[in-house]
Image (cartoon, rainbow, N blue to C red):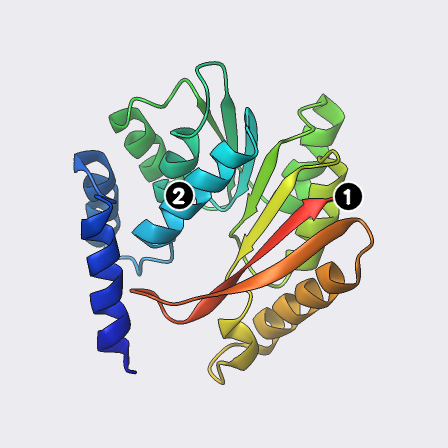
Amino acid sequence: MNDEYFIKAENYISALFHLTDPVLAATLQSVQDAGIHDIGVSPSQGKLLQLLARLCGAKKILEMGTFFGYSGIWLARALPADGQLITLEYDPQNAAFAEKNFANAGLQNKIQIRTGNALELLPKLEEEGAGPFDMIFIDADKPPYAEYFRLALRLSRPGTLIIADNVVRHVFDPATPEDKKNGVIRFNQLIAESDAVSAVILQTVGSKEPDGMAIAIVN
């Protein structure tokens, strides 16, 4: 099976379950208009995140890696009226685009964007007592993935769902820089050996390159 097959399958699933609407389409268009490579989740992955958020009854969600807000919209739509998503983004320009997209989605009151280095922002969230979060989604720069996970645990409770994207492709892609590859390998090894969580890696295919998501529940 080639890439064309997986793209056709992704499009079939997206059309079958109506995985787009004007707001989501406009968010994806904003990425294209900016001339930036789309590193966000696919529509079916976005719906998966939303379903997982609903399954765990999430009222407080933490996201690392806002990008243009596509995954954030999926997650925030799963929240109850009094729910909140805090999303962390290193790049101020990306955060500005995401803020516009969140407003276009009518979700600005449910979403708080914090801009800066997540390794600095996460301890501040802990100091503020922002946690524990019901769900945490990690989709940021790969070298410090293991550190993100350790900090995520400090913002969790038993039953918190922790998901990390892009945890397979960079292990095997020869074009992946060593620091990124090693970051993912360290993360995967950590969650596999950690007594703090029960975890598995789910391989993913579709319109994005073949990859995988780690899914962990805090014990």
Residue 53 visible at all:
yes
Residue 68 visible at all:
no
Give the spatial CA distance, label 1 vs label 2.
26 Å
Q: Disc 1 residue type?
A: Asn
User: x and y percent of residue 162 in the render?
Assistant: 62, 46
Say which quarter of the image contains residue 120: top right
Q: Residue at x 75, y 36 (%)?
A: 158
In the image, is 62 to the left or to the right of 8? right
Q: Disc 2 residue type?
A: Ser
Closer to the camera in the image, 105 or 219: 219
Q: Secondary structure at mark 2?
A: helix
Q: Earlier in the sequence, mark 1 or mark 2?
A: 2
In the image, is 3 to the left or to the right of 52? left
Q: Quadrant of the C terminus?
A: top right
Q: Secondary structure at mark 1?
A: loop
User: x and y percent of residue 17 in the render?
Assistant: 24, 46
Give the number of the disc on residue 84: none
User: x and y percent of residue 50 in the render?
Assistant: 42, 39
Q: Is residue 37 above or below residue 174?
A: above
Residue at label 2? Answer: 71
Closer to the camera in the image, 120 or 19: 19
Q: Residue at x 48, y 32 (%)?
A: 54
Dot 1 crowding, Cα within 10 Å, few <14, some 14–19, many 20+? few
Discs 1/2, front = 1
Residue at label 1? Answer: 219
